[in-house]
């Protein structure tokens, strides 16, 4: 199988699924465009000025050709909905600067949307704890790019609040332990994250096995035959889901 270069892998995405449209994917788009420009050896036109034709004719002509290539790469990865005027005499750097300014301009409405989405985020049942934490971190990073830094105390509270009802006993236990801990260093965001990851590992470890026969699984889920204590009331003989209290 023939080895593909970066451009052959990434650029088709930039012309289709990863095409810059409304700016939601701007940072991903800019990163992928950077890969393609480097792979084609034309990224330097974004940082170096055009050489003088009198002093360096060969360098001047090469820069002009590479600038055209870079502009074509940029224009080809932009959706026509953007209606960005791309005049032929504009440099690739000027075009990139205009695109960057368009999608990095501070916006109060966007900040409000990002904050509301972050605070309302809820982990779905069955989602990996690590995946959920990564998604929450990505939202914090996106808000930071908009000039809105989220304090760690707020991140810890939002993270705890984002877990579903089945995690209620875990959240109560972590909250109590954090409040009672006299070491302030163990009350930070990373401490809460570590406790949640440990709790998630235990929940996955003791989760009922899906490979059991239906009859066996049904029997093991029957509250009358449950051999253990309820997480809610502490009484023996029934599960948290079947707790009458």
Image (cartoon, rainbow, N blue to C red):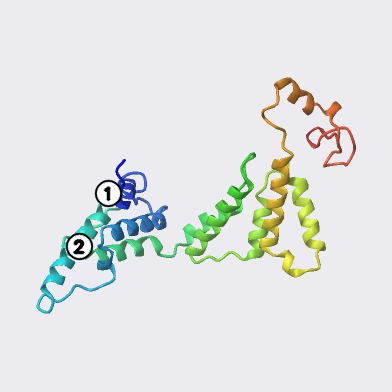
Q: Residue furthest bottom?
A: 55
Pointer 2 residue = 66
Q: What whole-number distance in Å separates the C-alpha atoms at marks 2 and 1?
A: 23 Å
Q: Secondary structure at mark 1?
A: helix
Residue occupying the far top of the picture: 215
Of mark 2 and mark 1, the one earlier in the sequence is 2
Q: Secondary structure at mark 2?
A: helix
- In the displayed structure, does residue 89 sit left or right of residue 198? left
Point 9% across, 78% down: residue: 54
Q: Is residue 129 left or right of residue 203?
A: left
Q: Which mark is residue 80?
A: 1
Compared across the picture, whether 49 is left or right of 230 comes to: left
Q: Residue 30 at what x, y percent from top left?
A: 36, 58
Q: Can you name the residue that lies furthest to the front here?
A: 1
Q: Position of residue 143 (x, y in %)?
A: 52, 61
Which of the two residues, 108 or 197, is positioned nearer the viewer here?
A: 197
Q: Is residue 230 above or below residue 72?
A: above
| Residue at 81% across, 34% down | 239
Question: Image quadrant of residue 156?
Answer: bottom right
Residue 136: mark: none
Q: Percent from the top left, x then y, of residue 69? A: 20, 58
Mark 2, mark 1: which one is toward the viewer? Answer: 2
50 vs 152, left or right, is left
Say few, some or many: other residues with alpha carbon within 10 Å of mark 1 (under 14 / 14 to 19 / 20 or more): few
Which quarter of the figure has residue 72?
Answer: bottom left
Circle 2 packing at 10 Å, graded few (<14), some (14-19), many (20+), is many
Quadrant of the snapshot with the C terminus: top right
Q: Residue at x 40, y 64 (%)?
A: 105
Tell which residue pokes out farthest to the right in this image. 235
Q: Nearer the viewer, residue 42 or 187?
A: 42
Could you tell me residue 140's position as x and y percent? 55, 59
């Amino acid at each position: 199988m023939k080895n593909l270069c970066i451009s052959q892998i990434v650029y088709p995405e930039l012309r289709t699924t990863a095409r810059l449209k409304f700016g939601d994917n701007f940072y991903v788009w800019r990163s992928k465009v950077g890969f393609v420009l480097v792979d084609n050896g034309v990224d330097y036109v974004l940082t170096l000025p055009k050489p003088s034709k009198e002093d360096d004719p060969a360098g001047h002509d090469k820069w002009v050709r590479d600038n055209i290539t870079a502009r074509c790469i940029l224009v080809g990865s932009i959706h026509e909905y953007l209606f960005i005027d791309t005049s032929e005499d504009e440099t690739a750097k000027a075009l990139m600067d205009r695109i960057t300014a368009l999608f990095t301009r501070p916006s109060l409405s966007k900040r409000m949307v990002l904050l509301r989405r972050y605070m309302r985020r809820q982990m779905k049942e069955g989602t990996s704890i690590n995946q959920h934490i990564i998604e929450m971190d990505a939202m914090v990073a996106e808000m930071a790019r908009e000039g809105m830094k989220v304090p760690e105390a707020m991140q810890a509270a939002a993270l705890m609040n984002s877990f579903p009802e089945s995690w209620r006993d875990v959240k109560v236990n972590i909250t109590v332990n954090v409040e009672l801990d006299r070491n302030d260093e163990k009350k930070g965001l990373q401490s809460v994250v570590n406790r949640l990851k440990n709790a998630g590992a235990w929940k996955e470890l003791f989760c009922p096995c899906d490979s059991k026969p239906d009859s066996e699984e049904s029997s093991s889920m029957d509250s009358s035959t449950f051999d253990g204590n309820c997480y809610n009331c502490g009484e023996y003989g029934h599960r948290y889901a079947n707790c009458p209290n």
